[in-house]
Image (cartoon, helix red, strand yellow):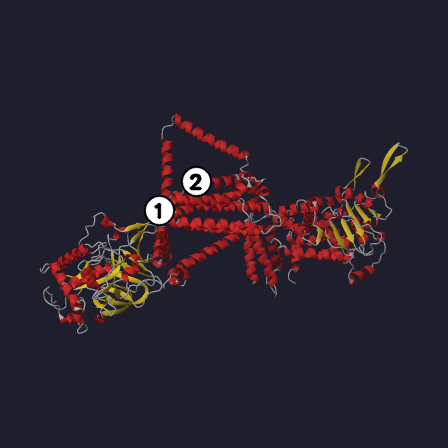
Amino acid sequence: MVLMFMSDAIRSAPVSDSREILLRLRSNISHYIKGKDDVIDKVLICLVASGHLLIEDLPGLGKTTLAYCLARSIDASFSRIQFTSDLLPADVIGVSVYDESTRGFQFKKGPVFANIVLADEINRTTPKTQSSLLEVMDRGKVSVDGETYEVGSPFMVFATQNPVDYGGTFPLPESQLDRFLMRIHMGYPGEEQELEVLRNSFLNYDDISMENVVGHEEILAVQRRVWDVYVEDSILEYIIKIATATRTETEFKAGVSTRGSLSLKMATQARALYYGRDFVLPEDVEAMVDPVLCHRLQLRRQTPDPLEERKIARNILRSIMDSIPSPV
Amino acid sequence: MAEVESLHAVRERVLPQLNRIELHQVNYFLGVMLALLSLYPVAFLDSGVFLHYFFALAVVGAGAVIPRWRLVIPAELWRAIPLLIVLGFLVDLAVFAGVAGFLDALIRLNILLVCHRTVAFRKRREDPQLILLCLFLVIVVAVKIVSVFFVLQIMAFAAIAMGLLFNGNLLGNAEHEEGPRDIWEGFSWSHFLMRLRECADLRLFGLAGILFVTILSLSAGIFLLIPRLNLENSIGFFGLRDTTSVSRFTEEVGLRDITDIMTDHRTALRIDPPSRHSIPSDPYWRMVVLDEYSVNRFGESRFRISRALSRTTRRINSNRFSPNDLDWEANEQGMGPRGEWLFYLEGGVAQWLPLAGDFGSLRIRGTSQFNNVIPFRILSQIGVNSQLFFYQVSGMAFQDRFYDPYMSIADWPMVSPDSPPLPGMVAVETEDSFSYRSSVLQLPQQRRDREYLLEVAQEISGGETLPAEEFVNRAIRYLWDRHEYSLSSSLPAERGDPIVRWLRNEVDGHCEYFAGALIMLSRAAGYPARMVTGFQGGTWNHYENYLMVRFSDAHAWCEIYDGNGYWFRADPTPSGGDELLDGMDGDDSLFGVRIDASWLAFLDSLRVQWYRRVVSFDGTAQTSMAEAIRERMRILREGTEQGFANIGTSVRDWLRGPWDGPRWITLATILLVVTTVVFFGRRMGWRVVPYLVPQRARKTLDPVRRQAGILLRRLERGIADYDGDFSVPEPELASVRHELRVLRFGHPEDRRSPGKVFVRTRILLKRLR
């Protein structure tokens, strides 16, 4: 009961334009994705931070629908790439073909040229194809035959993977994982929420008729504002302490990279903005540590079950967080 | 591997720590600090250590500034140096110093060893060696120069030594011990200082500070408590003394007893006078007065305090008394000049208190019981102290005449030389006063002996009735003409009284024979006489400025009754300076005792230091020390103020003076120097300045953030602990909490009147309670 009502403080704070935009977006998505408010929050924070998202869960829990809903709610293009073992990089980023009429090669843009790209079952394809996403995820640009093409703006990769059925998959290399700002889990919906899903049943996301409620210009404006969110020195030190602790922790093969701590900082700024603040609180850091850092850490000892591995890593991270006093 | 290193680098950046090489360097510099600290006061010594001192200072200084030069010296030479130093010490001892200069030679040896241990490459186990060598130097020099600086020095010493040992522990036992080249090859001062600054941890300094202050206050507490709780007797070391073989003055003295005592060269009594000039040329410290004379069946003659005097002996129980309290009637000479005399009587010497004469008051610590023998003016404790016993006497007089009311009670039958001795004089214990008076006239029991004595007395006086002083003078001359002083007396084996035999045979003798003979001759001539034992003279301790009275200063002399109520001192022993005969030089009488500056005197002074500085440092002394410090501080402050005022005046005068050519040149020179310093300082980036301040100390939370953080924590705890209805409206709580968060974590520009927010928070906190 203690601090339950304190979340009102966020609402009572002066709501900025960004806040209003994001709330609009949120209510639109939650209209179709029932009972997953916290997941929607994280997705939106990731969007605000200009990051990419890796969603892990079993098939049929609404990963694709979520991505689709997000794309539809924004006035943004959406494309879906179904990753398979025989998919080639050209299938993702596009290919230059000879045009008879111009007597030259012309670049045919691949599905990656969209605002929201759903990379479904990303671990089913070969590392070669997986790496084709590296540059575009980093810079928002594609280089083909010496030419550089910009992808959509805003640009967000929504990758999904199934952590249970690992047969014949190619687990994402660390360099690739590091490019994702967050890794989240959908989880099963609650009974009530599932009941509601059943009542308004539709099976394919194509059946969803959504209106875009936010223009992509607005999203870009929000993304730009993230940089202005103030991070006090003690918060930065807190982030450094956490990163250092993961580096000295013997259970982990390696600690968090600098991109990791930078990502954590970005995520906290985005979260602050998402909740209508222009400064970061320690609780932002605490909330973002798990989704931002967990997938960047690999255990030194091998575990046969990937789910088990994620659980152990999360517990270690939690104990690290417990050992570091938050700056108040 | 590369990954591990990079991780290490990352960790190093966030939580920098000194590596092993740097810890070795710190260890070396701590050693240098320790050595310089211990060497510093050697400069104040007035003995011949200057050459060694400057050499050591130069070597250690060079080692501190440029540590790398030490790599040039081959390892074999480093190993040979201590051997050379010890050889040098032996040569020093044999050729220059001798036994008297042993201490100086030892200091010279110590300086060189400290120098070597500091500069040579130390292993971890050799750190304690350096600490011990430095400690020895510090203590010996401090004892020699006796300075308040010692307190500060030992405090700093303790801190550095603790740091050195702690640092040594950090180094631990490595599998691979770093060699001198590993440690010093790449040493640079700027890098070393930068690393120190990076790794300086305020918490460590804070902890060390707390530890240091705790130890300091504990020591101060003990120092203040010692005089109040009589701790000195609980500390075994300071009461340590071999009491089994200690000679003792008793109330019965044979003809060899005092001479036996004299063979012991230890110090029996230490006297701390008000000033060096308070002591007369030849002081006599009276302890026991003996009147009765007897010869036992083994033919040994003895003097003792007659039992008749037990009636006049009183027991007193006090810790402070004056001669009036003791019923000692005033001498014509009266009490001495003002001033405090402190007597430290070793345990087991005697129960009698050595005194020179009358005094203003006598004070002892605690209450003690005394026997007061009024006619003799002597005091004895009940039982002999096994521990050192000290008492304070103010207004001590050095007297050679003592008033005795008991002798003047009745008319004294002066015995004429030709009349036979009165029979009653031999028989004692009839009537108190009479028997006392008879005991001081008592002669040997054998008629033959008595007749011989009467004969000699007759010969000395020449048949005249002389005043007592004149007779004694003549008697002493008589003795000196026939006897020489010697510590061993070869008395022929005959029958009869030993003193009479000694007189008859004209052999050499020591003080008991001379005193005994004078007493017997005086008594035979009809002058009452008694023997006094105690100490005569003493030597002046050069180190601590006090009088050392050794057992070898033990002496026996006589007091003769002058017939007018006074006993006067007569010392017939040839080496003794009898005032009646000895023509002492006027200048010497100001200070006639010998000065002792030997090694033994130094050892003896250590014991007195302990008593002076610690044990007898009672509340009054502490107060006076505090006042002295305050006075010193006042003088210092006034001096500083005066100094600044003088500078101000001279600057003003200078400004008012004529602005001529030389003046402009001076000004230009100063300007040039300042500009140069600033120019090069800027080029060097004022690199020195940041080294002085640890990096972490500079980065502190600004006060608003800190206060907001504290209040935020309290507010959230207050909400968490609060159960029950909220009498505080939620929106208000939420808004205050938000304001606090803005103040704590927000951008400084967003702050709006922090003071008001804090006040609101405090009001809310009260309401939450």
Alpha carbons under labels 2 and 1: distance apart? 33 Å
Q: Position of residue A203 (x, y in %)?
A: 85, 56
Amino acid at the residue labelled 2: Phe
The secondary element bearing badge 1 is classed as helix
Amino acid at the residue labelled 1: Ile
- The residue wearing badge 1 is B635
**Marker disc for residue B54:** 2
Q: Position of residue B416 (x, y in %)?
A: 10, 64
Picture quarter containing residue B48? Answer: top left
Q: Nearer the viewer, residue B545 or B618?
A: B545
Q: Quadrant of the C terminus of chain B?
A: bottom right
Q: Nearer the viewer, residue A190 or B401?
A: B401
Position of residue B180 relative to residue B504, above or below, is above
Residue B402 visible in this rendered orientation of the protein:
no
Q: Residue at x 59, y 57 (%)?
A: B713
Total of numbered circles in the picture?
A: 2
Toward the bottom, the furthest residue is B430
Residue A316 visible in this rendered orientation of the protein:
yes
Closer to viewer: mark 2 or mark 1: 2
> The numbered mark 2 sits on a residue in which chain?
B
Q: Residue at x 14, y 56 (%)?
A: B474
Q: Position of residue B505 (x, y in %)?
A: 20, 60
Q: Which label's residue is closer to the chain start, 2 or 1?
A: 2
Q: Is the Cβ of the residue at disc 2 closer than 8 Å to that at disc 1?
A: no
Give the side of residue B64 with respect to residue A286, left or right.
Answer: left
How crowded pointer 2 is (Cα within 10 Å; few <14, some 14-19, many 20+) is rated as: some
